[in-house]
């Protein structure tokens, strides 16, 4: 399925009234729930054409961590949805003439983004950047009145202020020194450009370098690190 929904416990960062505690919940979730925290929604954007890839394992590790934290989780699988990364001429003209009117085919994705407190990106870094589907998704989804808005004096302001945290999960065929040398362009798009649209979202990155030569135990350890990190989100 292209979208997976995992219901969670009532928790998060905003105090609310008492919430019911169900048996079988992890102790940390029960404790946070008893303290009166509200539900947080997390959206995982997964971009890889193969569903049994290591990137898919990263996606699952992220979902496991978010679920352990008690969050509500949605997953967008761009390849499974055959998402078209190309903005058509008609879509471009419609965007210009309507000041950010959303194409009907994108409404579900936009609604998920606007509802999310947490955004998680799981993808491989290819040619020093984001995969084409993920880059195209950003270009088609993160438009006016979604990622940014204009004031009456035409100043650009953040529109994704609902997003409080961004997690970036990626693999590289190259070693760390080379990625640092070329400035990790994929990360910069998400941790700088996209973050500006949120106002002040906290960014956490988990990267596996030299992917092709990593031992299996290192890969397993990396996945556990992702799960443990997002379990604390």
Image (cartoon, grey):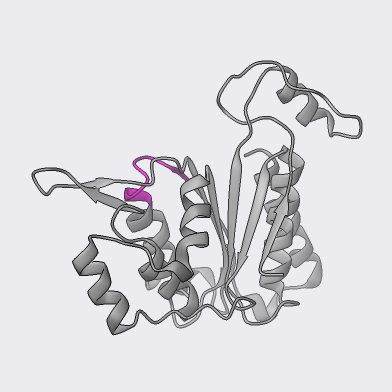
Could you tell me which residue is drawn at 68 percent across and 53 percent down?
A: 226
Query: As displayed, is residue 122 above or below residue 212?
Result: above
Left or right of 92? Residue 225 is right
Query: As displayed, is residue 76 above or below residue 230?
Result: below
Could you tell me which residue is drawn at 42 percent across and 59 percent down?
A: 190
Q: Is residue 133 magenta?
A: no
Q: Nearer the viewer, residue 166 or 117?
A: 117
- Give the quarter of the figure containing the N terminus: bottom right
Task: Indicate the quadrant where residue 153 lies.
Answer: top left
Question: Magenta residues?
Answer: 195-202
- Give the quarter of the figure containing the C terminus: top right
Query: As displayed, is residue 95 above or below residue 161?
Result: below
Residue 79 appears at what percent x and percent y?
60, 78
Q: Nearer the viewer, residue 7 or 231?
A: 7
The total of numbered circles placed on residues is: 0
Task: Indicate the quadrant where residue 136 lies.
Answer: bottom left
Could you tell me which residue is drawn at 48 percent across and 72 percent down?
A: 134
Residue 163 appears at what percent x and percent y?
46, 43
Could you tell me which residue is drawn at 75 percent across and 54 percent down?
A: 224
Dominant SS in magenta: loop
Q: Nearer the viewer, residue 100 or 12?
A: 100
Residue 221 appears at what percent x and percent y?
76, 58
Would you say residue 90 is visible in this rendering?
yes
- Residue at the right extreme, as displayed: 23
Left or right of 78? Residue 22 is right
Would you say residue 184 is visible in this rendering?
no
């Amino acid at each position: 399925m292209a979208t997976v929904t995992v219901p969670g416990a009532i928790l998060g960062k905003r105090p609310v009234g008492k919430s019911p505690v169900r048996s079988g919940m992890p102790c940390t979730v029960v404790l946070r729930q008893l303290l009166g925290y509200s539900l947080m929604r997390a959206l995982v954007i997964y971009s890889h054409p193969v569903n049994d890839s290591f990137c898919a394992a990263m996606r699952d590790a992220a979902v496991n961590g978010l679920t352990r934290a008690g969050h509500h989780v949605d997953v967008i699988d761009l390849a499974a949805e055959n998402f078209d990364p190309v903005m058509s001429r008609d879509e471009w003209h419609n965007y210009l003439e309507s000041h950010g009117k959303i194409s009907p085919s994108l409404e579900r994705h936009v609604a998920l983004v606007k509802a999310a407190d947490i955004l998680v990106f799981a993808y491989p870094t290819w040619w020093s950047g984001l995969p084409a589907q993920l880059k195209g998704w950003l270009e088609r989804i993160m438009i006016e009145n979604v990622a940014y808005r204009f004031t009456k004096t035409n100043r650009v302001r953040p529109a994704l202020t609902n997003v409080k945290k961004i997690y970036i999960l990626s693999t590289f065929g190259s070693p760390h020194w080379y990625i640092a040398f070329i400035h990790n362009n994929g990360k910069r798009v998400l941790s700088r450009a996209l973050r500006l649209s949120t106002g002040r979202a906290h960014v956490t990155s988990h990267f596996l370098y030299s992917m092709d030569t990593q031992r299996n135990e290192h890969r397993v350890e990396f996945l556990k690190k992702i799960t443990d990190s997002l379990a604390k989100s």
